[in-house]
Image (cartoon, rainbow, N blue to C red):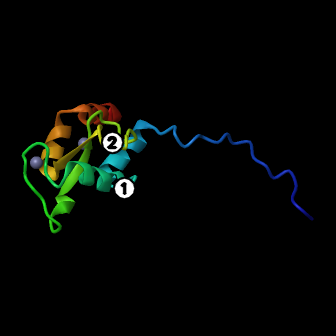
């Protein structure tokens, strides 16, 4: 006996409809959507925009890309939404910036 009418009526969510929780998870994971980091490092150089520390091939993993508007889906190819921050400055930035507000709302 064949199975028929196997279709389910679950509406498909468009991929662009991410929840804030998803975004925060990606931010925490650090590397979520990949190659904008390399692009930003290329455009802005291996230097922290805040403390001015320079990085080389050995410690470049300590340099992260910060999204100025706090939205890591906003990745204009000219790098205008990116800032290269070392992990220390980056953490500092988020401890009092946009993301801190996000996280607070999430915990409620
Ligand atoms: Zn720094
Ligand atoms: Zn950031």
* Residue linked to disc 1: 35
What residue sits 19% from the left and 55% below the top?
Answer: 63
> Separation of disc 1 and disc 2 at Cα?
14 Å
Label 2 packing within 10 angstroms: few (<14), some (14-19), many (20+): few
Instruction: State the quadrant of the C terminus.
Output: top left
* Residue linked to disc 2: 78
User: Picture quarter containing residue 69?
Assistant: top left
What residue sits 18% from the left and 61% below the top?
Answer: 60
Q: Earlier in the sequence, mark 1 or mark 2?
A: 1
Is 49 situated left or right of 65 in this image? left
Query: Residue reaching furthest bottom?
Result: 58
Instruction: Note whether residue 30 is visible.
Output: no
What residue sits 17% from the left and 58% below the top?
Answer: 62
Residue 33 rendering spot, x and y as whole percentages: 40, 52
Question: Is there a contact, CB below 8 Å, between mark 1 and mark 2?
Answer: no
Label 1 residue SS: loop
Q: Nearer the viewer, mark 1 or mark 2?
A: 2
């Amino acid at each position: 006996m064949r199975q028929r009418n196997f279709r389910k009526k679950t509406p498909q969510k468009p991929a662009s409809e991410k929840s804030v929780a998803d975004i925060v998870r990606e931010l925490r994971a650090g590397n979520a959507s990949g190659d904008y980091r390399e692009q930003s490092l290329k455009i802005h150089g291996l230097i922290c925009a805040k403390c001015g520390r320079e990085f080389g091939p050995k410690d470049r993993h300590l340099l992260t890309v910060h999204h100025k508007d706090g939205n890591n889906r906003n990745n204009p190819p000219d790098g205008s939404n990116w800032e290269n921050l070392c992990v220390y400055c980056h953490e500092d930035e988020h401890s009092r910036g946009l993301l801190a507000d996000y996280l607070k709302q999430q915990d409620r």
